[in-house]
Every structure is written in C-alpha cells, then in structure tokens.
Image (spheres, helix red, strand yellow):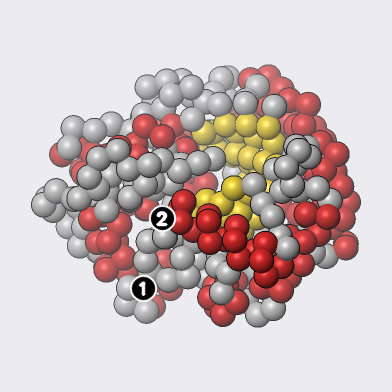
Amino acid sequence: MGKMQDCASAAALPPAGAPIESGIEPFALRLDREGLELTRTEAVVLQVNVGFLCNQACRHCHLEGGPERPEVMDLETVRRVIDFARKFRFGVIDITGGAPELNPHLPALIAGLAPLAPRIILRSNLTLIADPAYDHVLELCRGHGVALVGSLPSLNRSQTESQRGDAVFDKNIEALRKLNAKGYGRPGTGLELDLVSNPSGAFLPAPQDQAEKKFRRDLERKWGIVFSHLYTFGNVPLGRFRKWLVRTGNLDAYMKKLASSFNACTLPGLMCRTLVSVSWDGFLYDCDFNQAADLPMSGRRVHISSLKAPPGAGVPIAVGDHCYACTAGSGFT
C-alpha cells in the first residue's frame, strides 16, 4: 500500500462526453477520450473482505458497514479463501471489513493464511483493539507478524468523532498505546503499524508527506505514540458517504472536484491493477470499491470456488465514476 507522487499536471481537460447526474464526464469516456486504458498486470495482492458487520457506522464508509449488517463471511468461504491462496500464492494478503475482528472465523483465516504469503495485513478501526475481549486477535496477529493498518481520520477529536461517533477518539488513542506496548510501530520489532487518515468532509486529503510529519510529531508529543507510516486517502463517493453528499447538496461539487483533479500518471500504480478482491460471500471484484458499487470482475459474477487462475495481465478492469477518487491528485494506490 502506498501513494504515488504526481508525475505530471493533474489539471483536467475541458469536459466532454455525455453528462450524468453529477454533471461530469463518465470515467470510462474520460479514459477513452485521453487514449488511456485501465488493465491488469500480474495479480500479487489478495484482498479479503470478511463482512460488513462493524461496531461503528462511519459517515465516510463506502460499504455502509454497521452493527446491523448481517453479511459475514462463513467458515466454508474462509476455507475456500485459504485454499485459493495456497493454490495461487500472493505476495500480500489484505484482510478488511467492516470490522474484521467481529468475524468469529477471523482467527482461522489468519492462521490459515499466515504461512501462505510473505505479508499479511489486517485493517482495523482501532476501537475493538482497545477492548480486552479481542486480545486474542491481537496476540494472534503479533505471533504471525501481521501488519496492522489503523484508521485515524484526524488528530482533531471533534473531526474524528463527527465522522466515526462519540468517544471514538479516546478509544483510538488507547488502542495505539496498547499496540505500541506490544511492539507495534516500534523500530526493530518487525511489527508494522500503519495509519490511514481521510478528510471529514467533501474535500481532498492533505499532501501525504506533510500529514505524516504532523501526525508523527503530535502523536508522540501528546500521547507518546509512534507508528510506521501514514497514508492519506480521499473518500470514495459510494455507500454512506455518497448518501451524505446527496443529503447535504455536495455531490455535484465533490464529483467535479475529483474529476478536475484527474491525474493520468496515477493509473500505473492503482491497486486494482494487481489486486484480486474477494467479497464476504466469495465473489470476485477488481477492488473493494467495485464490490460496493456491484461491479464484478470482468463484468460477471465469478465465485472463488470456480476460478481456475487469477486474472491475467491485460484483462480490462471494471470502472465507474467513483474511480475518479482513486485517480485524483497523487492517487489512491
């Protein structure tokens, strides 16, 4: 996971093509007009979404995860994912949700995948890590050297809690201190702790290098917290965030902002080019955002149990207008 640097001007060309609801040129037409293609290279990352069940209902969530969501990966699908990873071997396996800790089969998934890839990542909203009831998950991750990616939208309490809910900020700080005490984020331990920050509203994120310096300085000065890396990503206009944009009258302006920041130089590094994304029920997508948009890989629903091989180089990637979020500015890779 990383962020591309701008390699050319991100200024938009004059709008063209058929307008849609938000008044922008459809992403697919934008690629075609500029003579660009979005196709796959070798599949080296397996992303596994273990369900939409979450202890939070964050305003920016593209999947609309929350406490009432029933979609949770069952044990049979967990076993199929492990078999798939054993058969085809990936360099990175990325476990996400919802809140993955709430899936009762997460320990079996981690234990089964850990011997199969050099790098395992678990994404967390951090609040459950602060809960002693999930210490067994933390110890399992620590024992297998699983890298943790924690979401910390802002160092501002009110901004974080307006996006994620009351009392979340203190739980995040508690979780980060707990992770540091276990060795996560500390040099020389081999236990990577990365943070992800995203805007609280309808605007683009701050430059990543500047944000990382601020987070590193303030977290250590105020709370004695250290971490490995910080990534800043824009909010994707899907799910609950899209509904918020519509409700507040910000959809058109936000989509135009994303489209006007389109940067063709981000295309080679987009995560969808090297990623196979597995949904909670075992179906395949080019990325987690396409899962939210119901855009299956290669335009047809394929279950992990029936795939004979990962998609090969040159296979087209399904796109929608939400892809502008991943290609704006320095990109979402």
Q: Name the residue beneath numbered marker 1.
A: 246
Marks 1 and 2 in Cβ contact (< 8 Å):
no
Q: Mark 2: which secondary structure?
A: loop
> Which residue is painted at 11% across and 52% down in the image?
14
> Which residue is painted at 47% across and 70% down in the image?
200
- Rendered position, 116 above or below 102: above
Q: Residue 161: horizontal and vertical position, in percent?
A: 59, 76
Q: Residue 1: horizontal and vertical position, in percent?
A: 54, 40
Q: Quadrant of residue 152?
A: bottom right
Q: For the image shown, how many numbered marks are present on the structure?
A: 2
Q: Mark 1: which secondary structure?
A: helix
Identify which residue, 206 or 242, lies in the foreground: 206
> Which residue is painted at 59% across and 48% down in the image?
229
State whether residue 167 appears in this view: yes
Q: Name the residue beneath numbered marker 2.
A: 207
> Position of 295 compared to 53: left or right?
left
Name which residue type carries label 2: Pro
**Dot label at residue 16:** none
State whether residue 296 appears in this view: no
> Position of 102 compared to 59: left or right?
right
